[in-house]
Image (cartoon, rainbow, N blue to C red):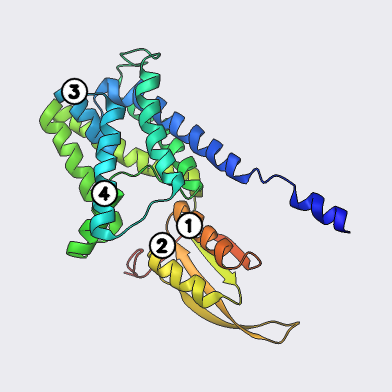
Amino acid sequence: MKKKSHQKNRQLDFRPLKTYAVITLGVILVALGLDLFLVPNRIAAGGVSGLATILHYLLHVPVGATMLVLNALLFLIAIRILSLGFGIKSFYATVALSVFVDLLSRFLPPNGLTNDMILAVLFGDFLTGTGMALVFSTDASTGGTDIIAMILKKLTDLDVPKGLLLIDFTITLFAAASFGITIGMYSLLAVIVNSFTIDSVLTGVAISTQVIIISMHGKKIAKRIINEVNRGVTFLKGQGAYSGKDIDVVLTVLRRRRELARVKSIVREEDPRAFMMVSHVHEVFGEGFKNID
């Protein structure tokens, strides 16, 4: 028995390696989408990468290095104003993306693969959206304008999704002012397609995700979901049929798969033995979702 237990303890845990492999694959796909399609055609598809694309043509600075500087400034702002911390995975993803964007650009065609704007938007967003979805699936982030959206929420009560939309729209206006209205319109189209691609890759055709969690640590889990995922939680009263014990069943509805990745991390940290059910729902009405009317 002791020998078996000793062998079990010595088994290697490859999950962190798998996680970083997925993040690396994701940032490479994002870098390819930028270098092969979006940047050569001056398409600023929102976010830090879009702003870096505009500055690349206006100031002749490398896209990747500009992304790294902008993200570093945003991280400092988040730590100072929002008191937010950032995990090692997000730090790695942010730095890796900036490095790969500039590194791969040296070996890829400088003018990209096509000058057809529609093809550039579709294929560029397919690569960047898929790559970002992979990064989000590991509960990591590449930084970006999410931080500005959170600052707007703190200062104006504007919710994060609307804040992101406002920021991306502003960047596309900047692109239109810099490169012309046509490029600005293609950039706005790219923002829409990119958002749709990320959500489609992560959630399929489902609009939202319902999560039911049965755990003796339900109150701790619910509190973290409210504070860290910014989603509402409802307690359902339950009773174990075998144990006869009363238990709080946690019910929450999420809009994006990246939120589900965070909830899974919270449950794993608070109660690895929790019972968790995830299902897709096609329509959700109420606060944070669609109006009932």
Give the residue type that dot 2 points to.
Answer: Val
Task: Decide which of tag 3 and tag 4 comes sooner along the chain.
Answer: 3
Check disc 3 and report its element: helix, strand or loop.
helix
Cα–Cα span, label 2 and label 1 = 7 Å
Q: State the residue position of label 2.
A: 229
Q: Residue at x 75, y 52 (%)?
A: 9
Give the residue type that dot 1 points to.
Answer: Arg
Check disc 4 and report its element: helix, strand or loop.
helix
Instruction: Locate the N terminus by quadrant.
Output: bottom right
Q: State the residue position of label 1.
A: 262
Check disc 2 and report its element: helix, strand or loop.
helix
Q: State the residue position of label 4.
A: 76
Cα–Cα span, label 3 and label 1 = 36 Å
Q: State the residue position of label 3.
A: 57
Extreme residue in the right direction: 1
- Position of residue 227 measured from the top left corner of the image (x, y, whole percent): 39, 68
- Position of residue 116 measured from the top left corner of the image (x, y, whole percent): 31, 19
Q: Which mark is residue 118?
A: none
